[in-house]
Amino acid sequence: MASLTPNSLEQLRARLTQRAESSIPVWPVAVRPSAERNALALLLGTLLNKLPSDDVAPLVRPILNEQDENGSWNNDLSRTLEIVQALSQSQRPEARPHLNKAVTWLEEHPKRKQLRAETLLLLGHTTGLGAPIRFKQLLKPALRVAIDWSFRKAMTSRKLAAHLLMNDAGGDKARMSELIGRQLSDGSWDGNVRTTALAMAALRQAGLPATDTLFERGFRFMRVLQQWDGKDLIQAPCDISNMLHALTVRSLLLAGAENNDVAPSAMLLLHQQDQSGGWAIGSSQSVDMMTTASALDALSLFGDNPLETRWARRRAAIYLAAVQHADGSFAMQPKGNWFGFRGLRGDSSLDATSAALFALCECGEPSAIAAMNKAAAFVKRAQNSNGSFPASTMKSQLVSTVLAAEAMDAFGGARAQVERSLEWIVTQQHVLGGFGDELGLTSWHTAMAIRGLSLRPAKHAEQLATARTHLTMRQDDETKWWQDSALNVFATGVQERLSVTEITTLAALEALNVSSRMRAMRTRKQRTPTPKG
């Protein structure tokens, strides 16, 4: 049976120590595809004259590698136009053939109405080539309608930036002042790259001098989130450090590490806990249920030393009970915000409910028993007739089933339902031993399936052995990491779910440790009061 190697554990410990010793609560990761975000870094770096010349080629390479055969980027008119302008400004000779293909596609593209007003405004005032400069008075009413429709219900930072880009310099001091006041302590707007880029472009257009420290802080935020991936420089979309540190604590402890090895990450989680009691996926993001559950799970494994961890768990349990819906479920995003219409907030999430139930079962807080009973009832009702659970926030039926099975097993009193879930997971195993979805076999899905089947290790010993062997074979021999990833992160303020290699590696690390499930069960029994099953 496959097992952990000292090299794998030591490499992750070294990375954790490096992040802790840096005294910066940001863990940048290379998230692909990155063409759109790299283009923003090129555009803003050129506009502000802050982009080091040595970084231009590394930022351009990922953009070129992600171009489709037809010359576009993901058949998206706005994205392709932004990238074309960024590549034009980079003046890199290797980009010329790619630019020619892209321009040909743009000329032949019939659906001009798909061009977003935000893109038109951004390019008009960062390049001097866009329509808003030449035909500003004609386009202004239509652009205002498009902006109000795209960002309805609230005056968000992106909406403020778009209105500023539409006006002459100094012509809208009220919006300019409000946008300046929305810059966060880390230099960003809303904690993500696109909003930050739009805000800086808008304020520069509004007349703020390029020497203002606001631009230095904003571009530094973008630079902090840039990560080298081989020879390429990848602009990450946002900060997901809290999630990474929570998963690191869990994975390393279950892989046999001592508390001292993960203490810096545990302390960081304590410091990053929101005043509400929850956690955001990273600094300057909104509190979400998956990160809150992951952090509570990690601190439950970490223990009661220092004493602050006990109070942090209590605050988190109280918070979860406060935001629970009447039917027992949890939403991914408990607070209202402008992107609720995208389906990312408000509706009940099976994945968030399963994760919250599991974390509440582990935290050992008697006050959480009522919330656990309601959440368990919701999860049980969601099970399909074949034993599986419907795909939820993580967009994977396999992952939703694993999370639900773990939650029901931790709660107790649902053995038959857990067994049916595991039997369904077994039917999803490929002849090669791995697991996946419509995208094919991935290390992340395989690691998650191993987590589920480890609930009954004796019964599913053969499937576990095959899956672990398959997972070991997918490990990169040189880096000792698992390079393939899946859509495994939900981030507030980002439209797509992110594929993060680090999370896949941490999941694989835990899955390859035979005793991880037994240790988790022992910890839970020591801390958790018996709920009414």
Image (cartoon, rainbow, N blue to C red):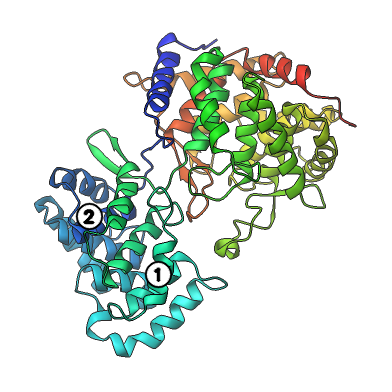
Q: Read off the residue under disc 2.
A: 45
Question: At numbered mark 2, what does the secondary structure look like: helix, strand or loop?
Answer: helix
Task: Give x and y (percent) for residue 451.
Answer: 62, 25
- Name the residue nearer the viewer: 40 or 394: 40
Q: Closest to the observer: 451 or 27?
A: 27
> Looking at the rendering, in which quadrant would you find the N terminus?
top right
Residue occupying the point 81% across, 33% down: 417
Is disc 2 surrounded by few (<14), some (14 to 19) or many (20+) residues within 10 Å?
some
- Seen in the picture, residue 443 relative to 461 is either above or below; the reply is below
Instruction: Please give left or right for residue 225 compared with residue 90 in the image.
Output: right
Q: What is the x, y in percent for residue 492?
A: 53, 52
Quick one: label 2 or label 1, which is nearer the N terminus? 2
Given the image, on which type of amino acid does mark 1 rest? Answer: Ser
Q: Are marks 2 and 1 in contact (CB under 8 Å)?
A: no
Dot 2 amino acid type: Gly
Mark 1 residue element: helix
| Number of numbered discs overlaid on the protein picture | 2
Q: Depth check: 476 or 128 in front?
A: 128
Which mark is in front, 2 or 1? 1
User: Residue 408: where, in percent of width, then height?
Assistant: 78, 32
Q: Which mark is residue 177?
A: 1
User: What whole-number distance in Å separates the C-alpha atoms at marks 2 and 1?
Assistant: 23 Å
Image quadrant where one finds the C terminus: top right
Q: In the shown orientation, is residue 426 left or right of residue 190?
A: right
Say which quarter of the image contains residue 300.
top right
Q: What residue is at 57 percent from the left and 17 percent from the top?
A: 253
Residue under the image location 65 percent in, 37 percent down: 293
Residue 110 in view here: no
316 above or below 391? above
